[in-house]
Image: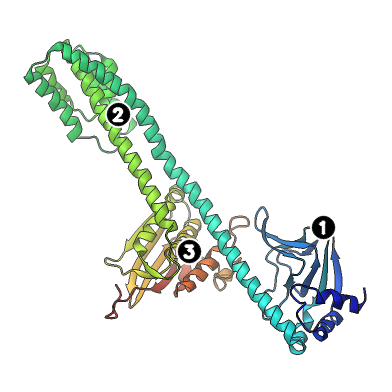
Amino acid sequence: MSSSDIVEQLSKHRTLGSASRTELEWLAAHGSLRHLSAGETLVAYEKPVEDLYVVLSGRMTILRGTGPQKQWEWREGDVTGVLPYSRVSASPGDVIADEPTDLFVMPGGHLPALMRECDDLTVILVHTMLDRTRGFKAADLLDEKLRSLGRLSAGLAHELNNPASAIERSASLLGRLLGDSERATRALGDAHLTDTQIAALDEVRQSCVSTRQRGVLSPLAQSQREESIAAWLEKNGLDQAIADALAETAVTLEALDRLASAVRSPALNDAVRWVAATCSARNLASEIQEAASRISRLVTSIKGFTHMDQATVPEPVDVEKGIDDTVTMLRSKARHKSASITVDVEPDLPRARGFAGELNQIWLNLIDNALDAIEDSGHVDVRATHERQLVVVRVIDNGRGIPDHIRNRLFEPFATSKPIGQGTGMGLEIAWRLVRHNDGDIRVVESGPGRTEFRVEVPAVVTEGGAAS
């Protein structure tokens, strides 16, 4: 293909076609055509990006990460590769032709001359570079949010499973206990108990309500309690089959003795059955209520974390609530590592001025990274204070520390100290970007084996008198 044919194609190019013909002729004279077959790699992951590529036809995709995942694509009319003022030096992924693709390729070494000789092309390529930067940043942020959503979904599913299973189990037992209570009630009605006997029966029932068993007994302690209650039932000539049910309640042997002195057999057997069923049913109802409350608190936390009503302009943000919601979301991960997380928030901490959803994303990335850095049974400490007109949040862990070769470029894209396949290197870069968007600052105060501290500063809400509030 002749130089004039290349110029003709460039003049019809969606991005470059508006440049003067003189400049297109200059470009055509300093490059060449290249054809890619479907599936052919233009630039491999982390290989140098040295040339400017003008897509004349076809389509290319950049793939990166595990999977791999599609990050960006270029079609006919697009320009990529080395652009004016771009800091791209290595490809962040594999650039592969999805279909037969024709390119015009200009070696990057001609770029300084292009910027001197071709004003129109320089302006067009600078705008293209800015659009590409914005696009990649938006894609990176979306990817990080999706990864965060995946982690949170797994943690939330685990957290919800426990109370949901408790509700299902308790509701199933409750139906059987209510049946036992109804049968015992009818039997007691036929026994025509006196007012004194009813009062004694009600006293035992009330003792179950007022002295509800706290915590969980060890298997040995529970077995000993069942044996002592079974022995009491045997001594009083009663049905020992209800020993297990009575042992699950908070009723004491002293309370049963008082009941036995007021109610004689055979009504005593029905009375004890009624106490076992009624007290157990109340305990199960309380457990169902606690489990349902736990689910409600989890839903409230996830709503607070995602901040569904996020504003489009900075507004006062409750940092303490955001940190608490974030820790709730990461609780299952901490439990999985037998790790502890403490939160220490200064009393009357002023609100921060920013975007609540973005601040929560920052806390998530930092605390999640800290959990990754510590060994099993490690510890993460989150502290929030205010200094001058700033809200300061510190995330401290007792993990292995940050390697020296990573520390100086910790907030750069793809910088990670995690093993291959376990980290993308985008979490801290996105946290840095979000901190800047909220007019704040983030840095590593110190890092070494046993202690790493990240410090985030964001503006506090300032009253008319100049004080943080």
Q: Nearer the viewer, residue 400 or 391?
A: 391
Q: Nearer the viewer, residue 291 or 118?
A: 118
Report helix, strand or loop for mark 2: helix
Decide which of 230, 201 is in the foreground and name it: 201
Please tell me whether residue 51 is drawn above or below residue 185 in the rendered image: below
Left or right position of 379 against 66 = left
The quadrant of the picture occupied by the C terminus is bottom left
Residue that numbered label 1 is attached to: 38
Vertical comparison of 36 with 156: above or below: below
Q: Are marks 2 and 1 in contact (CB under 8 Å)?
A: no
For the residues labelled 1 and 3, say whether their Cβ atoms are less than 8 Å apart.
no
Q: Amino acid at mark 1?
A: Ala
Instruction: Label 3: state its secondary structure.
Output: loop
Q: How far apart are the two marked residues, 2 and 1, measured between alpha carbons? A: 69 Å
Q: Which residue is mark 3?
A: 449
Q: Tell me which residue sits at (48%, 73%) in the image.
A: 436
